[in-house]
Image (cartoon, grey):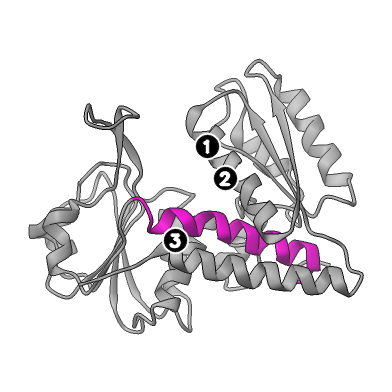
């Protein structure tokens, strides 16, 4: 069993991005600029955004954080999006999800200029991704594919089972692994809460990507010998022994599943670090106008 080290791979990629940014600046080019919009004080969102801002500094990007209270109206947030769309100094921006209930996330995502949509959530980017066209890939699926590539894990002709059908992870990662080329060419089965015989389906999988958000859903008796397991889950489970009062728990019962695997990601330290560097890669592409002129 080999542990897939997302921290180490993300550090490699950060170094590669920082090198390229240094070269752009040395040649008199524009420093890539990422803006994060944060609404409210959700603990998870606060942490994610703080990590994104810190990573921008590490790779040499300019970053701006715009904060709003929970009671911001949809119209005010749409006005902010419109302003960022028109600001030529801003290469890419994200509106951190989830948003308060009175604001339509779909409406906000659609209002973002797809050429600055470095989260990869805009329907234009999602559509282009499903067609195999150049686009901003959504961060977590992009990070998963990058891990498979950097560890040289064979995907061609393999049966990949994706647990979960979310728009942010399940659907896009299934689409990416079906694409022609490497890492891709998989036969993909997507399972969800209505799927019958999940255990039997998982036992046929060469690669399992667990993205249900159900702590320790994937048990040892659901995984065949030599499978590759990618755990996307990050649920805060109460734990009195921890100073924080909780333990970050994945969708995989790690102690049961790991002995059977050829490769497995830990939680934390697996997919999580890759999500933020994927956002940085998109921001660099946006700054260079490498995908959309």
Compared to residue 88, the image places residue 83 above or below, namely above
Dot label at residue 47: 1
Front residue (pair 16, 187): 16
- Residue 244 percent across, percent down from the top left: 35, 29
Are the residues flagged by discs 1 and 2 in contact, CB closer than 8 Å?
A: yes
Dominant secondary structure of the magenta stretch? Answer: helix
Disc marking residue 51:
2
In the image, is residue 117 above or below residue 24? above
Q: Is mark 3 on a helix, strand or loop?
A: helix
Magenta residue span: 268-290
Number of residues whose C-alpha sits closer than 10 Å to that of mark 3, classed few (under 14), some (14–19) or many (20 or more): some
Residue 30 is drawn in which quadrant?
bottom right
CA gap between label 3 and label 2 equals 13 Å
Q: Do labels 1 and 3 touch, CB within 8 Å?
A: no
- For image coordinates 54% across by 41% down, the residue present is 48
Residue found 67% across the figure and 57% down from its top:
124
How many C-alpha atoms fall within 10 Å of the one at disc 2: few (<14), some, or many (≥20)? few
The total number of labels drawn is: 3
Q: Which residue of the protein is positioned furthest toward the left in this rendering? A: 221
Residue 100 in the figure: left or right of residue 58:
left
| Residue 270 in sight in this render | yes
Task: Name the foreground residue: 134 vs 14.
Answer: 14
Residue at 40% x, 73% y: name it. Answer: 148
Disc 2 secondary structure class: helix
Q: Is residue 91 above or below residue 46?
A: below
Which numbered disc, 1 or 3, marks the residue that appears first in the sequence?
A: 3
* Rendering coords of residue 269 (x, y %): 38, 55
**Residue 7 circle label:** 3
């Amino acid at each position: 069993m080999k542990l897939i080290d997302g921290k180490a791979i993300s550090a490699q990629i950060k170094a590669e991005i920082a090198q390229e940014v240094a070269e752009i600046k040395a040649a008199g080019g524009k420093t890539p600029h990422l803006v994060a919009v944060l609404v409210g004080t959700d603990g998870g969102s606060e942490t994610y955004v703080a990590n994104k801002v810190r990573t921008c500094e590490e790779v040499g990007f300019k970053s701006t954080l715009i904060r709003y209270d929970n009671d911001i109206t949809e119209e005010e947030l749409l006005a902010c999006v419109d302003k960022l769309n028109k600001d030529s100094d801003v290469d890419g921006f994200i509106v951190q999800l989830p948003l308060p209930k009175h604001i339509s996330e779909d409406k906000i995502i659609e209002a973002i200029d797809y050429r600055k949509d470095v989260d990869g959530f805009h329907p234009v980017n999602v559509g282009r991704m499903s067609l195999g066209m150049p686009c901003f890939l959504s961060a977590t699926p992009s990070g998963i594919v990058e891990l498979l590539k950097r560890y040289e894990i064979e995907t061609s002709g393999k049966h990949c089972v994706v647990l979960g059908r979310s728009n942010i992870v399940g659907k896009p990662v299934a689409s990416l692994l079906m694409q022609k080329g490497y890492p891709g060419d998989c036969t993909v089965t997507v399972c969800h809460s209505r799927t019958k015989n999940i255990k039997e389906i998982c036992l046929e999988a060469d690669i399992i990507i667990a993205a249900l958000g159900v702590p320790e859903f994937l048990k040892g008796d659901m995984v065949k010998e030599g499978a590759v397991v990618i755990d996307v889950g990050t649920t805060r489970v109460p734990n009195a022994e921890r100073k924080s009062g909780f333990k970050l728990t994945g969708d995989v019962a790690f102690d049961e599943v790991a002995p059977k695997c050829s490769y497995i990601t830990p939680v934390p330290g697996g997919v999580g670090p890759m999500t933020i560097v994927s956002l940085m890669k998109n921001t660099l592409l946006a700054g260079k106008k490498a995908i959309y002129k």
